[in-house]
Amino acid sequence: MKTATGEALIHHGTLVDGNGGPPVSDAAVVVREGRIVFAGPAAHAPPVGATAARLDARGGTILPGLVEAHFHPTYFNVAALEDLDIKYPVEYVTLLAAANAKLALECGYTAARSGGSLFNIDVWLKKAIEEDLVPGPRLAASGREICGVGGLMDWNPDYRRIGMEGLVLLVNGPDEARSAVRKLVKDGVEWVKTYPTGDAASPDVNDHHTLCMTFDEMHAVVATAHNHKLKVTGHCRATAGIKNALRAGYDTIEHGTFMDAEALDLLLARDVPCVPALYFELASVERGPEFRLPPRVIDGHKETLEAGAESARMILKAGGRIGLGGDYGFAWNPHGDYAREISFFVKYVGFTPLEALTCATRTGAEILGRGHEIGTLEAGKLADVLVVDGDVVADVSLLEDRRQFVAVMQGGVVKAGQALSR
Ligand SMILES: [Zn+2]
């Protein structure tokens, strides 16, 4: 991805640097060749040349570009899970994924970690974004997800004679788990996404208290992935599934819904980040009836909503790391709504705005493995910056409305926001 040339000054705004400290009023950010050389009180800023680009934050907020830590660019706002795999061919899903990536960037998300991809689209989407062919967040790519045969993601009945190969690699036993990871290694993914547990979406045989992979399968996934320097994450709701994942050596936990004290200890022992992806649950409860989700499914989402909120509070309070991202790409939780996750964590879960913003920036970048380059506004980092017209700390829901954005920058280049259209 190309970075800006020359100098730029972002001024006349309040700085939230992503580290969680108090906001700095009357701040300035100075950028040279796409990297931050200064972020702090304007009075201490180094002088910039007469030719420097100047961006007036209009008394608003200057913060790091947001990071979507559980992004599914290939999920195309489906109303039924089955549509994911069979509604469209790979050619069309690829175009939809590119459109979703552009939208995410316009929504202030300058980086994202994929939480699982249809086909092998994310790997190539990432390349297209890196080469500036299409706009989008800096992407950490996942591939097809791994699930046990008969588990949550194995829903096409055998009599239909269609597999699940566009969506998942189904495994029986550690040998097949190893083969699946080896295929993903060849595909070029960075993250291996697995399904240790079921979900409220499947109340009959794979609900949120059901396991969908064995410990041995999960351990084989981790050993193979780590050997090839890939990272592993998993959809973990049931308590036993969370513990299996942490004991098997998972690098992050998705959802972490039913945490208990022992699971928390395991999480903290290796400082494993958790991405609750929790607004999805509220959206399923509130908007599910509109999309004919069965009452049992909605009841299950109520249970995972409450347990997930409690687990997130527990992790934050204990000093653990939380990433924000939200399984956007369903009809009731569509692309473009990403920042609802941040408002939700403030209004519903009880995080302070600064805590939620740190989760949505610095921790997200750490999850991507790029914490040294992005996620905070500090000297030396890439100038991935979001400038919002208004006080985001007073009202985080401003982030939900991209019309309020003065600028979305990647490497100092303005990619979206009002500053682009002038
Ligand atoms: Zn997901």
Image (cartoon, rainbow, N blue to C red):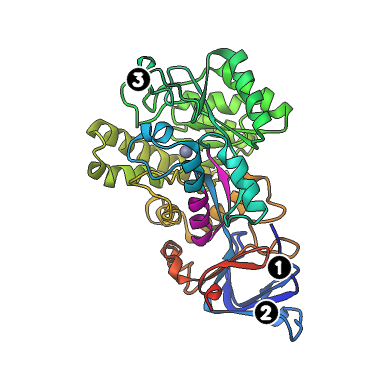
Q: Is residue 152 left or right of residue 374?
A: left
Categorize mark 3 by other alpha carbons within 10 Å: few (<14), some (14-19), many (20+).
some
User: Label 2: how many residues lie within 10 Å, few (<14), some (14-19) or many (20+)?
Assistant: some
Residue pictured at 36% horizontal, 18% vertical:
160
Do tag 1 and tag 2 residues touch (Cβ < 8 Å)?
A: yes
In this rendering, the label closer to the viewer, 3 or 1: 1
Q: Nearer the viewer, residue 365 or 85?
A: 85
User: What residue range appears in magenta?
Assistant: 98-115
Mark number for residue 53? Answer: 2
Which secondary structure lies at badge 2?
strand
Mark linked to residue 4: 1
Verify whether residue 111 appears in magenta.
yes
Is residue 338 magenta-colored?
no
* Residue 53 lies in quadrant: bottom right
Q: Residues within 10 Å of mark 1 (few under 14, many from 20)?
A: some
Tag 3 residue: 205
Work out which quarter of the rendered image holds the C terminus and state it: bottom right
Q: Amino acid at mark 3?
A: Val
**In the rendering, at what x and y percent does residue 317 appear?**
52, 46
- 185 relative to 35, above or below: above
Does the numbered disc 3 mark a residue whose Cβ is under 8 Å from ligand 1?
no
